[in-house]
Image (cartoon, helix red, strand yellow):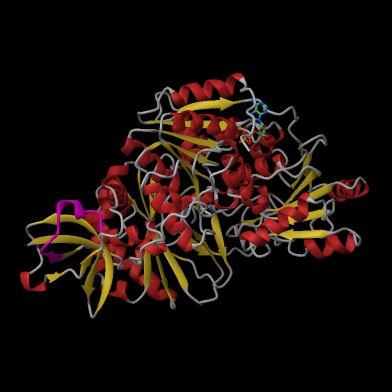
Amino acid sequence: MSILRVAIDIPLPRLFDYSSDDALPEDVGRCVRVPFGSGEKIGVITALTLNSDQAADKIKPVREILRSLPTLPADWLALTKFCSHYYQYPLGAVMAMALPPHLRRGKTPRRRAPSSAATTPTRAQTPQPKLLPEQAGAVDTVAAKFGQYAAFLLHGITGSGKTEVYLRLIEKLLAQGRQALMLVPEIALTPQLEARVAGRFPDARVVSAHSGVADAVRARGFLDALEGHADILLGTRLAVFTPLPRLGLIVVDEEHDASFKQQEGLRYSARDVAVWRAHQLGIPILLGSATPSLETFYHARQDGGRYHLLELTQRAVAEAPPAVRCVDTRREKLQDGMSAVLLAAIEARLERAEQSLIFLNRRGYAPVLCCPACAWVSRCRRCAANLVVHLADQRLRCHHCGFETAIPKHCPECGNLDIHPFGRGTQRLEESLSARFPTARILRVDRDSASTPAKWQAILETIHGGRADILIGTQMLAKGHDFPILTLVGVVGADAALFAADFRAPERLFSQLMQVGGRSGRALLPGEVLIQTEYPAHPLYQALVTHDYARFATTQLAERRAAGFPPFTFQALLRAEATRLEDAVDFLKLAAKHARTIATEQISLYDPVPMRIQRIMTMERAQLLVESTNRPALQNFLAAWSDRLYTIKMARSLRWHLDVDPLEF
Ligand code: ADP
Ligand code: ZN
Ligand code: ZN
């Protein structure tokens, strides 16, 4: 009789032992049906042992080892173990998340149909352009590292031919009989991209994996990948967990995109997990972006850095980048948030039957207080962050270190009484645009209007078909689509991001504006970007005007270094949610007490921050930041801390989680 150590999807960081008479060493990695409590659960066998820490009479026999399902390979078990450890999340829950829903429930997937929707064997090969010298150089450099770990950053503006580089590398890889994994942001995975990949490789089996794929199809695709039938796996963040026995290259396109980070459950970064996986398997990984995340850029720019930098400095197609200009809104009176310059530019587009996009930067930035008279901004006295306005209890709070103070009645610098949070005045934009341009067809594009892939597809068709004149959009429209008659991008409300409490806000703003600018002026019509701002001389806008990402990134990195923010430090947040804010804060105070007993001097602990966010569920939230300049030290601390957190009695009566490398504060 042997003991099986089984990972089960429950919210506790432990494995469970069961006995079996007929288990074999090769059953490790198999799904198993086990009794649990008064019911039954499906788990994954992580090890076969002879001894157990559990009392012998507590060890129950397994019900069934599910041998009709394929075995999850050892490298997959190692990958999920790494994630469990790194993100402080129970292994059984990691595995459940990494498996398609069908397999998670122990359901045997259908046999592979020859023309299954997820696998697209095509015949129409599309012709290949001749590579530009920089593209060819990038392909050769990466291909030279096939068969060993190496991480590359492919930095090039939209249209510089990055995707072409990926496709050439995949072609070389397939010729060696290996598999490729290509990860793209959620919104970028359109039928167009699938068709482009499938069209280039008519004899390859291309499998798509994203949240829009039906469960049964996803399970089939997962098995095709695992059994080595799939050649190319194209997917969003969840695809990073697909087992691929012949994997030879990982591509992460738009690597800076926030959708690679899961914001619930296992809060993993698919990009970071992909890098770990490439290292584990000894294969190259290529991260591509026009505006890399500062973390990635930092690794690529350091001498002897962890990533190799490959740059594409030219456009593959002969097009000038759009002309970017700032409209100084201190000098003119705005009409419902819009300047006369911008209104005139829209009018000119309407006359020429071209499209305009009004880009609203409304990404829920926590409001920061400012003085329009002297440009004073509410800053934290204890650290480098900006203070956030909490109107509910009239406080200013630092979301970073927990410092708080009352909202001042007047500007502490100049005495002005009219101080207010950034980012007002864009709410009624749609109404005022339709009042001003009554015959224009106005299309709003945001998370609500594009809530399903079908709706999103319909919106794209409306734009492409020229059936909209003015688009009003948020960051959704910034990504990966060419709109041939869109020639004007107006940016309003962007200044809020310059002084947001979230230190990543300028990075996001820059990348969105670069991307959204790239939407304008494709084909033969030149594009124009007008940014309404009270700070036209701000380095971020200046770098946009000159299309100079490196300059922007270099100044940002200098600021981050001075402030001690990532990538110069590593962070984790403990968040708690409860119906009463006091409970969430009390839990964090207890957690902080435990933390102080185990933290070494390499760990910085801050104060809990009550968030008091009014939400549908009327849940209140509080958070606590921990930091270290030493990642292993932080990891060790988190492991010990997390063990203690589970022992706190209060932990069972509210919701809490750890977010390692958090992206949002
Ligand atoms: P990116 O991924 O950087 O936005 P793409 O690879 O999609 O760029 O290239 C943009 C456009 O230029 C595509 O239509 C592509 O087919 C074309 N293209 C890419 N490389 C070349 C090349 N070397 N010669 C001609 N056209 C190219
Ligand atoms: Zn002032
Ligand atoms: Zn602070």
Q: Taking 482 as reference, is 500 left or right?
A: left
Provide residue 162's location: percent of width, then percent of height: 58, 32
Provide residue 451's location: percent of width, then percent of height: 63, 63
Say above or below: 226 vs 219: above
On-image quarter of the N terminus: bottom left
User: Which residue shows up at 36% across the image and 48% down it?
Assistant: 226
User: Which residue shows up at 66% across the image and 25% down it?
Assistant: 314
Depth check: 40 or 468 in front?
40
The picture quadrant where one finds residue 9 is bottom left
User: Which residue shows up at 29% across the image and 60% down it?
Assistant: 68
Provide residue 425's location: percent of width, then percent of height: 74, 61
Q: Is residue 105 magenta?
A: no
Say above or below: 166 vs 530: above
Which residue lies most toward the bottom here? 38
Total numbered labels placed on residues in the image: 0
Q: Taking 520 as reference, is 220 left or right?
A: left
Which residue lies most toward the front here? 114
What segment carries the magenta color?
18-30
Evaluate whether residue 506 shows in this view.
no
Provide residue 551's location: percent of width, then percent of height: 60, 30
Evaluate whether residue 374 shows in this view.
yes
Q: Is residue 29 magenta?
A: yes
Depth check: 445 or 251 in front?
251
